[in-house]
């Protein structure tokens, strides 16, 4: 037996059975919220680690710089306000270490910028398997542990019986001479970073399209003109990156060499700002003074890094 219901009754039954559908404006709002939230969900793990391992220790270092403490758990921390910063400004060793850090960075630039560019441009003429061997020999020093490199170089630079003295016929104590100790640290660090810098320049050269060179050759440009007016300008962002890494990383990378070879001597000739703040903390046991030096170091290098990044963006925009 069939019962014929009215169309209105059928519509009421269908509406009661069907699931409720949100209005279109609410769906659009959900989509916009999803597009806004999803990228931050991907970034959340990295942001969490950045806060835990970078910004939280930085805040703690700034807090520690306002206390006087000798690192002993049983010793109370005495608040001194800006006393550590004032004391640090009056120490000649602090300003001398900044000068040595600047000299270190300037001395590293030929190893991390000039020589890598020259070597990378010269290696373009090497072809086939020989090029792979050539690149491997250049990159190998970067893989040597700094402490192992320090031990080998101390043997090579041993006064009188070392390979260097025998080669040039001298009897000089290169490591413990105040006139040469800092140069030795710069040379060894540059020797290790040279391979990494050359690798970065090779990557920069690989990103330059060959169409520029072909067009210049069609116009009658010589190889030297192509390098001067096309290759080097297009390589300028890579060069600025190398300058930035040299400024920020060179003082850090010299720490193992200094601690293994000279311990900051002789007569603090190799004590840069990084080694000085470590010396304040773990030799003088003055945690507050070391933290104050670290905070000033972070602020100073942050300003320098910001300026270099701004210049790098301007150079990249100009090249585009």
Image (cartoon, rainbow, N blue to C red):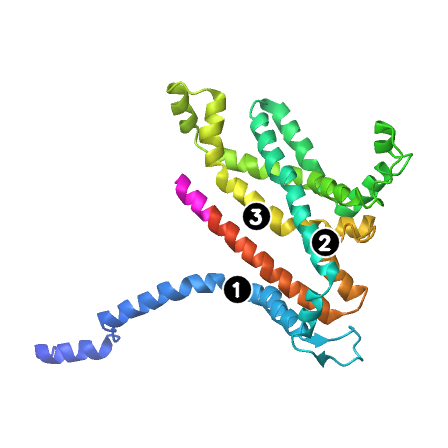
The quarter in which the C terminus is drawn is: top left
Numbered disc 1: secondary structure: helix
- Which quadrant of the structure image shows residue 291? bottom right
Q: CA distance from mark 3 to mark 2?
A: 18 Å
Q: Answer left or right for 157 relative to 118.
A: right
Q: Nearer the viewer, residue 48 or 161?
A: 161
Circle 3 sits on which residue?
A: 244
Give the class, few, some or many, for how many residues have Cα within 10 Å of label 2's Cα (few <14, many ≥20).
many
- Asked if the residue under mark 2 is in contact with the one under mark 3, i.e. CB atoms within 8 Å, the reply is no
In front: 162, or 140? 162
Q: Nearer the viewer, mark 2 or mark 1?
A: 2
Q: What's the magenta region?
A: 313-320
Q: Give percent across and percent down for residue 161.
A: 91, 34
Give the answer, above or below, for where 173 lies relative to 82: above
> How many callouts does the rendering have?
3
Name the one closer to the observer, 211 or 264. 264
N-terminal of the pair, mark 3 or mark 1, is 1
Evaluate whether residue 125 shows in this view. yes
Residue in view at x 62 percent, y 33 percent: 115
- Main secondary structure found in the magenta portion: helix
Query: What percent of the width, then of the height, locates residue 83?
Result: 68, 74
The label shown at residue 47 is 1
Residue carrying label 2: 272
The percent position of residue 50, horizontal first and vertical second, equals: 57, 63
**How packed is label 1: few (under 14 Cα within 10 Å), some, or many (20 or more)?**
few
């Amino acid at each position: 037996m069939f019962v014929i219901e009215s169309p209105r009754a059928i519509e009421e039954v269908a509406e009661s059975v069907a699931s409720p559908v949100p209005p279109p404006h609410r769906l659009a709002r959900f989509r916009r919220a999803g597009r806004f939230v999803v990228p931050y969900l991907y970034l959340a793990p990295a942001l969490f680690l950045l806060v835990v391992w970078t910004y939280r220790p930085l805040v703690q270092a700034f807090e520690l710089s306002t206390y006087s403490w000798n690192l002993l758990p049983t010793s109370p921390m005495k608040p001194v306000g800006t006393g550590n910063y004032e004391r640090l400004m009056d120490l000649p060793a602090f300003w001398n270490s900044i000068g040595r850090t600047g000299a270190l960075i300037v001395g590293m630039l030929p190893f991390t910028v000039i020589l890598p560019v020259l070597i990378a441009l010269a290696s373009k003429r090497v072809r086939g398997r020989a090029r792979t061997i050539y690149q491997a020999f250049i990159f190998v020093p970067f893989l040597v542990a700094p402490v192992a490199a320090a031990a080998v170089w101390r043997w090579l630079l041993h006064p009188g019986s070392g390979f260097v003295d025998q080669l040039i016929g001298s009897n000089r104590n290169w490591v413990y001479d105040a006139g040469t100790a800092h140069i030795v640290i710069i040379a060894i660090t540059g020797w290790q970073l040279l391979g990494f810098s050359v690798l970065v320049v090779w990557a920069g050269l690989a990103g330059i399209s060959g169409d520029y060179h072909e067009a210049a050759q069609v116009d009658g440009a010589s190889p030297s003109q192509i390098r001067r007016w096309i290759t080097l300008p297009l390589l300028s962002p890579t060069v600025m990156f190398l300058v930035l890494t040299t400024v920020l990383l060179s003082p850090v990378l010299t720490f193992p060499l200094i601690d293994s070879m000279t311990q900051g001597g002789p007569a603090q000739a190799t004590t840069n700002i990084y080694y000085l703040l470590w010396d304040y903390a773990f030799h003088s046991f003055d945690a507050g003074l070391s933290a104050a030096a670290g905070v000033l170091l972070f602020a100073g290098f942050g300003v320098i890094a910001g300026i270099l990044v701004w210049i790098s963006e301007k150079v990249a925009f100009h090249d585009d």
